[in-house]
Amino acid sequence: MDYINAIILGIVEGITEFLPISSTGHLIIAEQWLGQRSDLFNIVIQAGAILAVTIIYWRRIMTLLLGWRDADNRAYLGKLILAFLITAILGLIVKKLGFELPSTATPIAWALIIGGIWMMVAEWLAARRPPHKEITWLVAILVGIAQVVAGVFPGTSRSASTIFVAMLAGTGNRAAATEFAFLVGIPTMYAASAYELVKTFRDGGAANEDWTALGIAFVVSTIVAFVAVKWLLSYIQSNKFTAFAIYRIILGAILLGMASMGMIA
């Protein structure tokens, strides 16, 4: 059963990490039925999803790193670094303040609903702006802040908050906003995973882990995330994010109903 649960959680992480529907929220809910996983387990499946996106964007990443002599590449890379630094600094402050993720469904349900409504409004407002593809310095600053906000409020979704902040702050093009959000998410999530991994090993939390289950979950998460992100990048070329917003609202309402009936905590 542990291996089956590892596969299920790997699938959940792979699908939800980069789709604008909140991976943390889905995992917290899934763990109510499958049992709570260790911090190391959650780190490993997240690393699988990050690896998948790194593979998808490796050409773009190499172009930015090797083509730094080009002014446009330098500016874009600088904005990625700025967004990452803002997230890192604010994230460390949040950690120092002792923030902990909620373990109950109700706050996640409300975050899903409010986030879904916000996505619809943001999509409507962005549609009335020129479809600029440029990533401005303001967009970089706000995306960095949005990543921390999403981490503080599970159910918000890191990808949703960063994509729509970018669209509202001046990048009206869905594909351009999504690419920047995903690219800045790569170093952010690698850094967060490395931080938690070092902390877990230092505290002896890895001593009793089932490494086979971890390996299975990592592979499943990587494969599923690769397929999910490839599909999303194709989908947004001709579709809005409205379907994801509706899904969030419906799921949030279902979770609120289940919580009120005592079916989930």
Image (cartoon, helix red, strand yellow):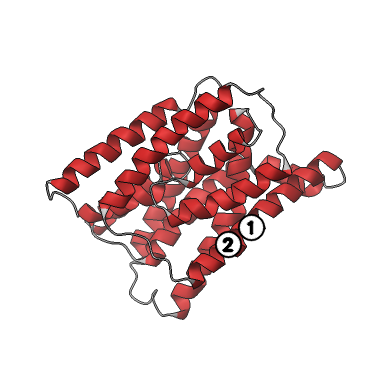
**Residue at left offset 23%, top offset 55%:** 32
Name the residue type under label 2.
Answer: Leu
On screen, residue 243 versus residue 138, left or right, reads left
Residue 198, image x and y in percent?
Answer: 51, 73
| Residue 206 quadrant | bottom left
**Residue at left offset 29%, top offset 59%:** 103
Considering the image in quadrants, where does the N terminus appear? bottom left
Q: Nearer the viewer, residue 174 or 115?
A: 115
Residue 83, image x and y in percent?
Answer: 65, 52
Query: How busy is the neighbourhood of tag 1: few (under 14 within 10 Å), some, or many (20 plus)?
Result: some
On screen, residue 134 versus residue 19, left or right, reads right
Tell me if I can see residue 9 in this picture. no
**Residue at left offset 54%, top offset 26%:** 125
Residue 136, image x and y in percent?
Answer: 72, 40
SS label for mark 1: helix
Identify the residue under disc 2: 90
Tell me if I can see residue 43 in this picture. yes
SS label for mark 2: helix
Compared with residue 150, is residue 166 higher up or lower down, i.e. above or below? Answer: above
Number of disc labels: 2
Q: Nearer the viewer, residue 89 or 81?
A: 89
Identify the residue under disc 1: 86
Query: How busy is the neighbourhood of tag 2: few (under 14 within 10 Å), some, or many (20 plus)?
Result: some
Considering the image in quadrants, where does the C terminus appear? bottom left
| Residue 20 quadrant | top left
**Residue at left offset 46%, top offset 47%:** 222
Name the residue type under label 1.
Answer: Ile
On screen, residue 25 versus residue 82, left or right, reads left
- Verify CB contact (< 8 Å) between mark 2 and mark 1: yes
